[in-house]
Amino acid sequence: MLSVAMRKVSLLTIALLAVATSLTACGGSGASNTISLNNASCGGTWTLAKPGWHTFDLYNANSVGGEVDLIDPKTGGIYAEIDQLGPGTTQTMSLDVGSGRYAFRCLFEDTDPLTGRTVTVPGHVKGFAATVPVTYNDLLGPDKEYQAYVAAGLTTLVGQTGTLDSDLQRGNLAAACRDWLTAHLTYETLGAAYDAFGSFDDEIDGRADALGVTNPKWTGFYRIEYGLWHGQPASELTPYANELAADVRSLQAAWPTMEIPLIDIGLRTHEIMENALEFQLTGHDDYGSGTTLATVLANIQGTRELLSLLHPLLVSRYPGLPAVYTWLDRLQVLVEAQHQPDGTWVPVSQLPVSASQAIDAACGQVLEELAPIASIAEPRNA
Amino acid sequence: MAEADEHPGRRSFLRGIAGGVAGGVVAGGAAGYALHRPQPDAALATDTASLDGRLAAVPFHGRYQAGITPPTQRATAVISFDATTDGKSELIDLFQTVTSRARFLTAGGTPPPVGIDGPPSDSGVLGPTVVPDGLTVTFGVGSTLFDDRYGLASQLPERLTPMQPFPNDNLDPAQTGGDLILQLSAGNADTVVHALRDIAKHTRGGMQVNWRIDGFTSPARPAGTVPRNLMGFMDGIANPPLSKARELLWVQPGTAGEPAWTADGSYFVVRLIRMFVEFWDRVDVFEQQQMIGRDRATGCPLDATTIFATPDFPADPTGAVIPLNAHIRLANPRTPQTADSRILRRGYNYDRGIDQVGDLDQGLIFTCFQQDVKRQFEAVQTRLIGEPLVDYISPFGGGYFLALPGVRDTADWYGRALLT
């Protein structure tokens, strides 16, 4: 018993030591290059001796946490930011300082923004450029337009899922296969709203993964696809088509009360295609129709919609924007090449290696080009 | 995007041509890796420096690629890619991007911050500062790159073909060949993984992975000997000295039939060889040693008492001590007639899960470098056809490549002589 008790004590000691060590590593306050921030002074009398690489140790001397930005106070451009600096902690900020104006701005919780002194680096030395932040206000318009885009898509979808439902009620499986694809592709153009749809998304477009393909709780497009391409009779699928049409109508009715968070508009610009790569180009979401490449095209269309809404905000902020379109265009051409003259699509599992390599590579490059938009279009304080 | 600002007019479809901020941790050639410091017995080099993950930077620039002649490092990855670039100018862009990433990764330094303009420029796998950790990047081209896509058919190296299958081979097309080959080797696996993530991130649209395999070099056990393979035998003992590099290793200017751009390159053979280790472990050690021709415990030839002793085959004409079909005897008969078929072997062990019956999927990433793949590797492999060892191994993939000439300086790039 004694040895157990002693071991407990020594473990506690180790834990305390570990805390002490991490405080030294992450929360030290004594270093000479530390810049102290509090609710009376954001940076104090800090200075910049010369251009070049600088690392600032920013210490939050306040009793609350907050965001710290290094800004150009004239333009409001942000050179660098620390999203969350906890009270009593220190984080580093590094950048290549060029000629220009620099000031720290503190955005402590429950406190008005506080901008510290402006430090000017004279001359014509090129450094890291400040980006004028996208504000909450800037995103209200795009968000509203996207809401309307989704509303229009849902109106279309109500009609298309109704058609699918009546195909199956009439027992017309050939028409059902055709109309299933039309309706599913409409849904696949609305990718930035899936999270806002909440549980509707699971009901309308859920995967079998957690349930298994024989589980009656599995509903929606993929369930119907599975049945249509696995020889299930119309009578078995009609209840699912009926439920799908009803779910879409319910979603349409609820949509005016739903909101897409402003941050989602930027985030989804790459996340739609991340999902296309993970679930469509891998064939994971092919439940029999072999149309995941058509889904990718619908996903590209949905991504293009977001880009067009954000274009005015991005065009001055993102030098990589032309490359986004270059690669989206290339990916689209490569995918469309797999649309057969008879209207069918080549399943990804049957693509020649060179074709799948070209498509996967282009999609990967699209994602690299899209990724910065989530940061750039994140809503920030002006 | 600072880098885009710096190159406003440049049409570059591959991201991040600008590298990190090299410097800071760049060290000289203290590890003795440079070719001009001959290492007759490379495999004997101490590997203790890798243990703390702080191997010095191996100088990237040079007449030859820096990853060919050093002793094998503790960790490696061999990755085959197919080019997905559209046309020659994009292929140039790809090769320049690989060059700039390799230049940064081998030197180390601090990746540039991006402010609010995007995700971090580096994966962070090595922490805030990229350590060189002895990283070498070896980049090569396969024969398929010289098809009609890039107008390079007339530049095909004279001796570069798809990998020739030998009688005991069981080549899987999905793990064989490729337009490009990349070998990343360093003191630790995290350094290798970091380098692969970085290069792949910057070349997404330009090349796509065909197959890959990770490997390791074991510490020499006992210390001061030679690392062992997964059959328990020391491997790579009898490499030729670097004083023979001109005759055996590098494609020379004016080598018969070779296009001029290949000078200072080296034929790079990769063979992925499964070892049936369970079967092997059920074999009597005497029989194991007869198959190899060396003592398993000590590494000595069966007719000698030191590791690096030259076996005296003429004194054993009937194979009474070292059988005539022992691996070391067939691979390197030590005759004047076979001296020009010697190869520089740089094998790594691999260990990657299990097969369909639950046996361990372990083996050897056999890599070797040479001046002439026909005169050297194929001649050696032809002598080995039917050796008793074939029952315990199965070559299943790999390929023939030409490791490009070295990148000479900051203005140079991989394949410049080929592509311009």
Image (cartoon, coloured by chain):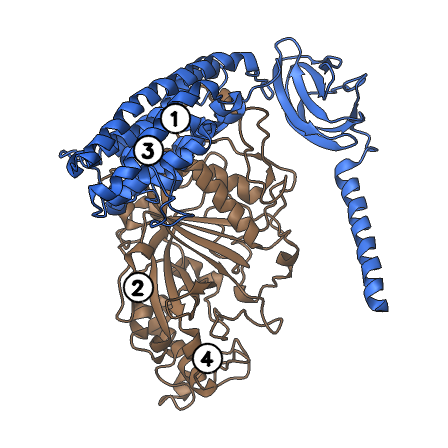
Chain colours: A blue, B brown
Q: Mark 4, chain letter?
A: B
Q: Mark 2, chain letter?
A: B
Compared to A345, does A117 lie above or below? above
Report the mark closest to the observer, 4 or 3: 3
Foreground pick, B70 / A12: A12
Report the mark closest to the observer, 2 or 3: 3
Classify 10 Å Cα crowding around label 1: few (below 14), some (14-19), many (20 and above).
Answer: few
Question: How far across and down, in percent of the image, does residue A116 sit?
Answer: 75, 15
Labelled disc at residue A191: none
Question: How far across and down, in percent of the image, does residue A382 sit?
Answer: 61, 13
Q: Earlier in the sequence, mark 1 or mark 3?
A: 3
Visible in this render: residue B1?
Answer: no
Q: Amino acid at mark 4?
A: Asp
Q: Which residue is mark 3?
A: A244
Left or right of A106 on screen, residue A317: left
Q: CA distance from mark 1 to mark 4?
A: 66 Å
Labelled disc at residue B281: 4
